[in-house]
Image (tube, helix red, strand yellow):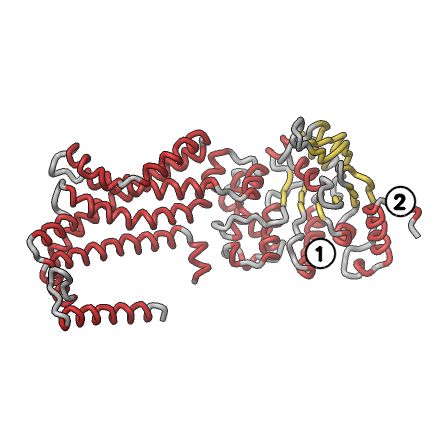
Amino acid sequence: MTAVVVEHVTKVFNKGRPDEVTALSDVELTVGDGEFVSLIGPSGCGKSTLLRLVADLIEPTTGAITVAGKTAGKARRDQDYGIAFQQAGLFEWRTVLRNVELPLELRGLGRAERRARAEEMLALVGLADFAGHYPAQLSGGMQQRVAIARALAVQPPLLLMDEPFGALDEMTRERLQGELLGICAKTGTSTVFVTHSISEAVFLSTKVVVMSARPGRITAAIDIDLPARDEAARQSERYFEHVTAVRQALRGVPAESAP
Amino acid sequence: MKALPPLVVGVVAIVAWQLTVTLGRIAPFILPAPSAIWAELVEQKRNVWEAALASGTNALLGLVAGALLGVLFAMAASRFRPLAEVSIPFAALLSALPIIALAPILNNMFEATSSIPRRVVAAIIVFFPVFLNTLRGLREVDPIHRELMHTYAASGWTFARKVRLPGALPYVFTGLRQASSLAVIAAIVAEYFGGLQDGLGSRITSAAAFTAYPRAWAYVVGACLLGLVFYLTTLLLERLAMPWRTRLIA
């Protein structure tokens, strides 16, 4: 079963009004099980819109979205995905542990099971010692890790991330990228990841989907095969080739005609 | 030692007051000396205590009733938009009226021995700051929190309980802090307009009427202390209710 199927999706905001905007035009996307797909493109290309459509936070104007074999709405109600945004969006009145517990709480899990699962997730992101802290006591990078732990808490088959590392410094960002890959490999989670960093997209993904603006559409899908995803991979020839390919696709230059 | 500077200023002010009154031979009906007020306070401490207890009870009951109503109305108004649109201008208008002026009317509505009028006045005065602040807090929800709860498929009631209410707590307490002092003022001043005469307000007026100025001032000191107790208790409750903020200060 494929994790996400997007068929002929068009999204028009403010339809029929003078400020009508076509955010997405006839988009097709398939995310296979265990795949890590990045959406990359200039601002206004509709990459976040596409992610929000998959999350059923907004509805498509035309077309269909299937998540884990169900409609996007059903998948949302069944909590078939975890989501993380650019801002951690933690609840400041809850401790770190209780933030991670929240999605489990809403699923009706028992207290003990909730706690055990949340502690496990916090250990996964390396924050086991901070379970009793409040979010405001943590750094930005730590808060983002809590948000990722929260997204993973229901052990969803699909992880949706909207520039989750966008607000972090380069070093924290690279460390979290490594951690995220490890977690996804361990749990077999499929991921849709919105970013505007080419290097981040190439390093993380099995497929980079390049989008362009006005109207938002997919212009290229580049498969990334790196033998390993470690620090050495960031320096490898193959990695830079892929970075170049993505950059050219973003500029609209066909890959073959590159010098 | 953050408490030291205000303490020093306070002591200096009292000494200066004492010296001005004794050296300047100021008549006690203009301004009695702090030593005279203190002597009255010690002598009358039982009466001051009982009057403060009566006024404090009225203020407390008014505060609790007004605050509960304020929070409940704010919850209803945040849930049903038309209700908020109608009630906010009304609340703003009504809170601009001198509600204390209702006291004589309320006094006539109930028996002379009833404590209800003073409590009602306090409750009405408390209602507005609590209502308006709470409503503002309930309406200000982080858009990310809203979306997250949507992805969790949370119902409206769950959303209100887990996100809106805790998120509004700082606002509720801003309202309560204003309201706690207002409740004491209302309970005391309402007595100036008649009704049952057992609180600080009536003691102040009767002492002043008998030209017992140091005694009147002793009751005023009692009123100050009562207001302070209310305010500090609210601050303490605020800390207890929001441990995530307290820990940041600590």
Q: Is residue A257 above or below residue A79?
A: below
Residue A184: % across, % down: 70, 48
Instruction: Tell me: A191 left or right of B210.
Output: right
**Residues flagged by tags 1 and 2 on a common chain:** yes
Q: Which residue is mark 2?
A: A254
User: Within 10 Å of the Cα at label 2, are there few (<14), some (14-19), or many (20+) other Cα atoms?
Assistant: few
Q: Give the answer, above or below, for where A172 lies relative to B191.
A: below
Quadrant the N terminus of chain A occupies: top right
Earlier sequence position, callout 1 versus callout 2: 1
Residue A251 place in picture, x, y as percent: 83, 47
Q: Residue visible at 14% across and 38% down?
A: B114
| Image mark 2: chain | A
Q: Residue at x 53, y 44 (%)?
A: B142
Percent across and percent down for residue A59 are 65, 31
Q: Which mark is residue A178?
A: 1
Q: Nearer the viewer, residue A255 or A148?
A: A255
| Relative side of A118 to A25, left or right | left
Give the CA distance from mark 1 to mark 2. Answer: 31 Å
Q: Secondary structure at mark 2?
A: loop
